[in-house]
Image (cartoon, grey):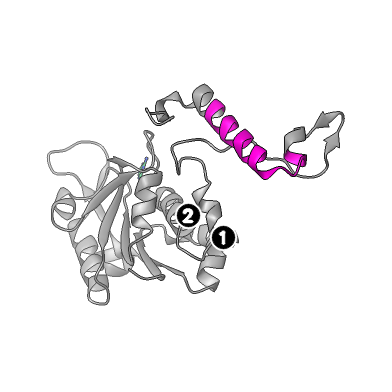
Amino acid sequence: MGLFMKIDIISVVPDLLQSPFAHSIMKRAKDKGLLEVNIYNLRDYTTYARAQVDDYQFGGGAGMVMMIEPLVNAIESLQQNTTYDDVIFLTPDGNTFDQPMANQLSLKNNLLLICGHYKGIDQRVRDHFITKEISIGDYVLSGGELAAAVMVDAIGRLIPGVLNNETSALTDSFQDNLLSPPVYTRPEELRGWKVPDILLSGNHAKIEAWREEQSLQRTKERRPDLLDDKH
Ligand code: ADE
C-alpha cells in the first residue's frame, strides 16, 4: 500500500475519458504525482480487419458483443507491466458502487478498468480475467466510460494528499452514513436571507453540535435508509 495509485482503463471510446481527469481535483492528483490514469484504446489490440472489436452474438438476438480476443490481448499485454490488485468490469449487473467501496479501492495501488459497450463483453472474459464487477447505479449507460470516470473521481479524491485539507474527505456525506449539513459563505445576508446566527457565533462546540444535529435531521428526511441503530 503506497501513496501512489495507477488506474489503467481499456475503452473503445478513449476520447470520452480525456476531459474528466484533466481538471480540478483529478488534475491536481496527477500534478502532485499521486494518481496516474492511462487510457488504452481496445482497437489497438485487435487482429481483425478494420479494427473490429465486436461481433454478432451466438444464438442470435439483437446487439453486438465485444469479442474475447481483443480484450484478452489488451489485458494480458497490460499485465506484463503491472500486477493489478483488481481487474474491474463496469456493468449495470455488477455490485452497486458506494462510498465504502470507494474507500476500499482508494487503498489499492494498481487497478485495471474495462469499459463495456454494445450488449456486453464475451462471458469468458468475465469468467477468467475480471475480479470485480461494478455498476454505478440502476440505469443503463451506453458504455462503461462515464461509469469509469465516476469511479476514478470518487476513488482519486480519497488518496491521501489529493485534497488540500485531508480531513475534508472524512466529513463528506456518507462517510459516517450521514448526509452533510448545510454550508454557507459570504455575504452574511442577502435580500433578507440570513446565515444561521450560530455559525457566526465563534463557539466551535456549539457549531459542531448544530452541524451534527442538521446532518441527522437531513438524513432522517431524505435518506432514512442510511440510519441504523447508532443514530
Ligand atoms: N455500463 C452501462 N451501464 C452501466 C452502469 N450503470 N454502471 C456501470 N457500467 C455501466
Q: Quadrant of the N terminus?
A: bottom left
Q: Give yes or no for residue 32 being in the magenta stretch.
A: no
Q: Is mark 1 within 8 Å of ligand 1?
A: no
Which residue is painted at 82% across and 39% down in the image? 188
Question: Is 173 placed above or below 213 here?
Answer: below
Which residue is painted at 40% across and 53% down in the image? 148
Amino acid on which the number 1 mark rests in the picture: Ile
Amino acid on which the number 2 mark rests in the picture: Asp
Query: Looking at the image, can residue 46 be seen?
Result: no
> Is 107 in front, or is 116?
107
Residue pointed to by mark 2: 153
| Residue 39 location, quadrant | bottom left
Q: Does label 1 or label 2 sit earlier along the sequence?
A: 1
Magenta stretch prevailing secondary structure: helix
Farthest residue to the right: give it: 191
Q: Quadrant of the C terminus?
A: top left
**Residue 53 placement (x, y as % from top left):** 27, 58
Question: Is 21 placed above or below 135 here?
Answer: below
Judged from the image, the quadrant occupied by ligand 1 is top left
Query: Looking at the image, can residue 225 be seen?
Result: yes
**Residue 212 placement (x, y as % from top left):** 56, 35
**Residue 120 placement (x, y as % from top left):** 26, 46
Residue pointed to by mark 1: 25
Q: How many marks?
A: 2
- Horizontally, residue 66 falls left or right of residue 170, namely left
Q: Which residues are magenta?
A: 199-217
Kindly state the secondary structure of the residue where label 2 is placed: helix
Q: Give yes or no for residue 200 being in the magenta stretch.
A: yes
Q: CA gap, disc 1 to disc 2?
A: 8 Å
